[in-house]
């Protein structure tokens, strides 16, 4: 018998009517110094964000952005370290009182996307990317992240004498991934000694997110964002005239069969009752003329997973499918699965996340902080989270009255940031920072 049927209707009514503490009753108030700092810095943060938005720079090319960041940190009396992982910038704010060490991270790079927002400060920047002319746009919100962390820096420096502990500011380049043949991002910052002389006991980061309504924050303990791997598969046939396919080996037909069969790697070979997984093809290149069957076709795609064993198995299964499907067509393949080292799973430390949840609720209210589903997108913040207990959270970017489910997503040429998210992000990061520094040591 279902448990609910064991209670009488009267008892259920009494239980429903019984007074109890609500989530709001247990949420601390937003700190007065946080509210004051946010009010005074609001316009500055908006102005910084608009400036960065109008002057976006691709991964490993963030020269102007890094210079602006370092210049402002020096103006605050800090001594920034520059040139980490090409254009990374860090600075340490030392409080006047003893306390823990923490780190706060913002990413700075933009995307090869031609902006279509119509904003008065929309990007007009163009460049050549992978041999193609394209625009450059802050289509993922990293301009907002950089501006928010600059605001946090201003606020913390202003209250430095009363600050407990030390805060490392991390302005990171190349979160979107280094260009071909280059290294970059969080992994290179760590390799370049980011935590060599300053090992934080906790680290925090945020991301403005189109699927979250402005005024809300989404966070979950444990796995949050997927591991990501890039792969390439080159299908080799034998070129011939399009009118006589029997005179060669058609790599296009073999590649088409391979793409379809590869979908069974997840749907039939992976136990997705444990964790979700994705295998997607994002690029197909082959041939130059309508009546020539080419020698080869290149397939490029991505694998997303949350479980290391599944990740390894999917890599092997995709390689197996590629080789055997190609052989069935008389073709061969060269596989690179994965290409280099992809981002690991972004995992929020459960204890740290539970501890800091009231800090987020203090900023937007308990009813506006919720646990999102697992996100198949990836973040190289994951590398920091493997080194120190960390928490990464999403700040709503889509304006009230617009359905986040249908709003232009991050990476869209029409991605539109509600600038109220700048204020929420600033308040949230400040509240989390101060609450952690003044709380009990350890996560």
Image: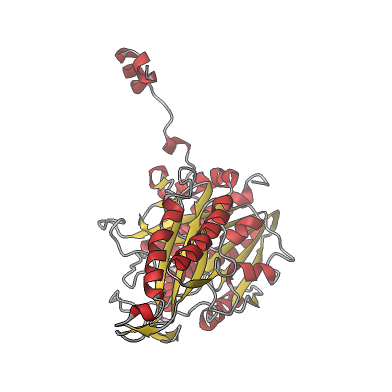
300 or 117: which is nearer to us?
300
Q: In the figure, 17 relative to 110: above or below?
A: above
Q: Where is residue 48 in the image (x, y as percent from the top left)?
A: 45, 74
Q: In which quarter of the image is residue 245?
A: bottom left
Q: Furthest residue to the front?
A: 246
Q: Where is residue 347 in the image (x, y as percent from the top left)?
A: 56, 52
312 or 418: which is nearer to us?
312
Q: Is residue 50 something that shows in the picture? A: no
Q: Position of residue 199 (x, y in %)?
A: 71, 60
Q: In the figure, 179 relative to 355: above or below?
A: below
What sort of colour scheme is used for the picture?
secondary structure
Q: Position of residue 438 (x, y in %)?
A: 62, 49
140 or 330: which is nearer to us?
330
101 or 240: which is nearer to us?
240
Residue sitting at x 54%, y 79%: 180
Residue sitting at x 68%, y 69%: 191
Answer with left or right where residue 24 lies relative to residue 160. left
């Amino acid at each position: 018998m279902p448990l609910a049927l064991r209670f009488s209707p009267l008892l259920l009514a009494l239980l429903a009517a019984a007074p109890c503490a609500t989530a709001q009753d247990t949420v601390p108030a937003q700190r007065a110094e946080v509210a004051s700092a946010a009010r005074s810095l609001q316009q500055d943060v908006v102005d910084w964000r608009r400036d960065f938005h109008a002057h976006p720079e691709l991964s490993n090319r963030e020269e102007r952005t890094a210079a602006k960041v370092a210049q402002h940190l020096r103006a605050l009396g800090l001594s920034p370290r520059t040139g980490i992982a090409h254009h990374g910038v860090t600075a340490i704010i030392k409080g006047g009182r003893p306390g823990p060490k923490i780190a706060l991270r913002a990413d700075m790079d933009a995307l090869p996307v031609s902006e279509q927002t119509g904003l008065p400060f929309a990007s007009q920047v163009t460049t050549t990317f992978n041999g193609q002319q394209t625009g450059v746009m802050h289509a993922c919100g990293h301009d907002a992240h950089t501006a928010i962390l600059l605001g946090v820096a201003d606020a913390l420096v202003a209250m430095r004498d009363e600050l407990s502990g030390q805060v490392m500011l991390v302005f990171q380049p190349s979160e979107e991934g280094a260009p071909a043949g280059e290294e970059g991002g969080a992994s290179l910052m760590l390799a370049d000694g980011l935590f060599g002389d300053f090992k934080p006991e906790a680290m925090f980061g945020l991301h403005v997110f189109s699927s979250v309504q402005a005024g809300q924050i989404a966070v979950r303990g444990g796995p949050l964002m997927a591991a990501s791997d890039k792969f390439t598969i080159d299908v080799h046939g034998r070129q011939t005239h399009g009118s006589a396919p029997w005179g060669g080996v058609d790599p296009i037909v073999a590649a088409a069969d391979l793409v379809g069969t590869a979908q069974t790697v997840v749907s039939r070979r992976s136990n997705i009752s444990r964790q979700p997984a994705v295998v997607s093809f994002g690029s197909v290149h082959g041939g130059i003329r309508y009546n020539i069957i080419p020698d080869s076709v290149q397939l490029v795609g991505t694998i997303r997973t949350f479980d290391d064993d599944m990740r390894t198995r999917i890599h092997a299964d995709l390689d197996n499918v590629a080789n055997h499907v190609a052989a069935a067509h008389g073709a061969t393949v060269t596989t690179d699965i994965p290409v280099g080292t992809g981002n690991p799973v972004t995992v929020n430390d459960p204890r740290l996340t539970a501890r800091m949840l009231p800090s987020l609720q203090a900023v937007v209210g308990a009813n506006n902080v919720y646990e999102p589903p697992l996100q198949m997108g990836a973040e190289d913040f994951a590398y920091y989270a493997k080194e120190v207990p960390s928490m990464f959270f999403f700040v709503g970017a889509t304006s009230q009255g617009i359905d986040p489910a249908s709003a232009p997503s991050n990476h869209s040429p029409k991605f539109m940031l509600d600038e109220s998210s700048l204020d929420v992000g600033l308040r949230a990061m400040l509240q989390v920072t101060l609450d952690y520094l003044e709380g009990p040591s350890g996560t």
